[in-house]
Image (cartoon, coloured by chain):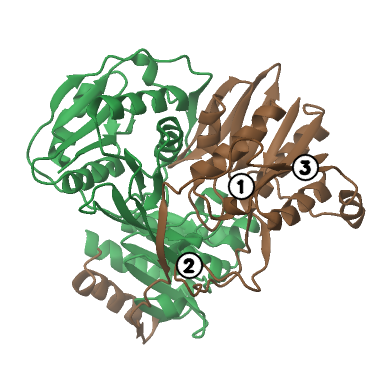
């Protein structure tokens, strides 16, 4: 039994799903009689109590100062460190998002403690602290690491590697008295892509395209299937380097390492860099003309065929099932 | 304006990973080592700032055993003015906070306006040293940047977050960790490689900086290769038949749609 603190990330008032996943992990790690504290920041932070409580939080620590509305690494890290001290947390967790990784790194340095990054399995050993499994070399290998002594033991959790476990409870709100430090760097605005695109790092379904599409104009085939599946559009390094699609879509080493429920690789041969980034996906579909392409070695289902023929048919069939 | 770019010496991203005999790390015998790709982006952005006149001095820094000298020479060959090697053989096996502390000690003496490094060192894939360094140096930071504009003691950086680009503004001194941006890292010219041999490379012992790594806070217990994936099913027939069968399997068998 332990106290576990979770940093919640809110965007536009909504709690990030990856944060709720972290709360449910915290619930399991805290154990019988343990306590889960979730930290919510910014105006309206107290509104997170029902969702955080349902995911497993006992208490919602609220720092509702509007100074936290805009992301700034220093004040965020300061308040997380303060909450860790005040709650007496043995374990501190954050979602492995851009914000979570930023804040966790600073906080670990401020507290002089250890941090496990981007973990996909996690447990609290009987002696306390954390033990976790995490991909290294972009998923070419996995490491078991632990924080036996340093406290609080910290970890960031890979989005979608853990489920949200509903409890039907709500969290008790506790106000945290904070004096936000002046931020010397602050987020001033967001530039979102023209069409609201789902990011591959968070998507539960990804449809990726490679060289086999022959040109950027044919990426519409990938987008159509991704839309039909409600998924994100990914790409191989080759087509990103060729300028067909922005780097944000790149899956693999030097791109994003992903583990969605369904990964559909279209016209991608499966270079070692790409495989490293996606081979921990739950179900992998490969569509490629070349029956010897390495991608088929990791595929759950494979279609040896022309993407130009298969993709329209597949999109049509998916639409039928979904409607 | 002075920029220090921290580079990490890592196994080539094309390398196949084998497990060492002790089961705790990779067997790096015969593996080609490179400057971590995200550090190369950081270095390129620093070089461009110097070429634009915004920066006047560019220092490369790396912490580790003698093996990291190769990466520092590479940074000098593409254009860094000088290099600092924070030397301690134990740093190679140290955890992120210990490496950040050693780098912070050397950086405090350099007092640069900007510290650049990659968003993560490929291999360990932790992405911890950048934010930790910023905290230890008590300076603001931007993580995951892809673009920067600097002027009049202030800067604007564009960073990739989930599904959007976040624009961050702040004052110098600061630290920036780099993702891939608009600029491809340059190659070293033969002239650059020759010149690099004559450029200053200071060795600073971590123990002299009071930053020799202590006991690990994060213990690496073991590493393993990914479990082999069970053999897949290849669907046959024309495109229409295969597509139909695939959707049935995804729905009924895999239950992912």
Q: Secondary structure at mark 2?
A: loop
Numbered circle sitting on residue B180? 1
Shown colour of chain B:
brown
Q: x%, y% of residue B45?
A: 71, 39
Crowding at mark 2 (Cα within 10 Å: few <14, some 14-19, many 20+): many
Residue at the location (22% across, 25% down)? A61
Q: Are marks 3 and 2 in contact (CB under 8 Å)?
A: no
Q: Quadrant of the N terminus of chain A?
A: top left
Q: Is the residue at mark 3 from the same chain as the one at mark 2?
A: no
Residue at the location (24% across, 30% down)? A88
Q: CA distance from mark 3 to mark 1?
A: 23 Å
Q: CA distance from mark 2 to mark 1?
A: 21 Å
Relative to residue A186, is residue A223 depicted above or below? below
Q: x%, y% of residue A302?
A: 39, 79
Q: Which residue carries the number 3 mark?
A: B83
Residue at the location (45% across, 63% down)? A139
Q: Secondary structure at mark 3?
A: strand
Relative to residue B154, is residue B121 depicted above or below? below
Q: Is residue B54 left or right of residue A6?
A: right
Which of the marked residues, 3 or 1, is nearer the chain's N terminus? Answer: 3
């Amino acid at each position: 039994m332990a106290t576990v603190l979770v940093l919640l990330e809110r965007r536009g008032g909504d709690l990030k799903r990856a944060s709720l996943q972290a709360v449910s992990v915290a619930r399991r790690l805290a154990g019988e009689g343990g306590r889960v504290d979730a930290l919510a920041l910014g105006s309206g932070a107290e509104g997170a109590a029902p969702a955080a409580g349902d995911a497993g939080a006992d208490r919602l620590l609220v720092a509702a100062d509007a100074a936290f509305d805009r992301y700034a690494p220093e004040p965020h890290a300061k308040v997380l460190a303060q909450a860790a001290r005040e709650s007496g947390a043995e374990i501190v967790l954050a979602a492995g998002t851009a914000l979570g990784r930023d804040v966790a790194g600073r906080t670990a340095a401020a507290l002089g403690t250890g941090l496990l990054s981007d973990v996909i399995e996690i447990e609290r050993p009987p002696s306390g602290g954390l033990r976790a499994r995490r991909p290294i070399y972009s998923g070419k290998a996995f490491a078991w690491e632990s924080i036996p002594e340093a406290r609080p033991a910290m970890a960031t959790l890979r989005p979608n590697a853990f489920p949200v476990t509903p409890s039907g409870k709500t969290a008790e709100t506790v106000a945290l008295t904070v004096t936000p430090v002046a931020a010397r760097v602050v987020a001033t605005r967001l530039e979102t892509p023209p069409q609201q695109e789902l990011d591959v790092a968070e998507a539960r379904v990804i449809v990726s395209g490679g060289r086999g599409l022959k040109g950027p104009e044919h990426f519409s085939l990938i987008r159509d299937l991704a839309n039909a599946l409600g998924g994100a559009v990914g790409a191989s390094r080759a087509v990103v380097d060729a300028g067909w699609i922005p780097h944000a879509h790149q899956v693999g080493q030097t791109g994003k390492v992903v583990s969605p429920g369904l990964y559909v690789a279209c016209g991608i041969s499966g270079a070692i860099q790409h495989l490293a980034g996606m081979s921990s996906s739950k179900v992998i579909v490969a569509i490629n003309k070349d029956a010897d392409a390495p991608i088929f070695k990791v595929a759950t289902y494979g279609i040896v065929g022309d993407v130009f023929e298969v993709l329209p048919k597949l999109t049509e069939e998916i639409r039928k099932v979904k409607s | 304006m002075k920029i220090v770019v921290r580079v990490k010496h890592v196994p080539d991203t094309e390398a196949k990973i084998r497990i060492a005999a002790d089961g705790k790390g990779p067997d790096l015998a015969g593996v080609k080592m490179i400057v971590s790709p995200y550090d190369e982006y950081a270095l390129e952005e620093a070089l461009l700032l110097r070429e634009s006149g915004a920066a006047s001095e560019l220092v490369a820094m790396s912490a580790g055993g003698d093996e990291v000298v190769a990466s520092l020479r590479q940074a000098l060959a593409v254009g860094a003015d000088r290099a600092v090697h924070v030397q301690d053989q134990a740093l190679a096996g140290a955890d992120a906070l210990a490496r950040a502390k050693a780098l912070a000690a050397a950086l405090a003496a350099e007092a640069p306006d900007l510290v650049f490094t990659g968003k993560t060192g490929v291999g360990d894939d932790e992405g911890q040293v950048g934010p930790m360094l910023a905290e230890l140096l008590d300076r603001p930071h931007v993580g995951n940047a892809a673009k920067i504009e600097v002027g009049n003691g202030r800067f604007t950086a564009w960073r990739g977050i989930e599904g959007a680009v976040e624009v961050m503004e702040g004052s110098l001194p600061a630290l920036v960790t780099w993702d891939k941006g608009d600029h491809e890292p340059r190659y070293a010219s033969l002239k650059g490689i020759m010149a690099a041999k004559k450029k200053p490379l200071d060795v600073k012992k971590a123990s002299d900086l009071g930053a020799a790594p202590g006991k690990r806070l994060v213990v690496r217990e073991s590493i393993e290769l990914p479990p082999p994936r069970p053999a897949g099913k290849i669907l046959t027939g024309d495109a229409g038949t295969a597509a139909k069968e695939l959707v049935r399997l995804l729905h009924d068998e895999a239950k992912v749609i």
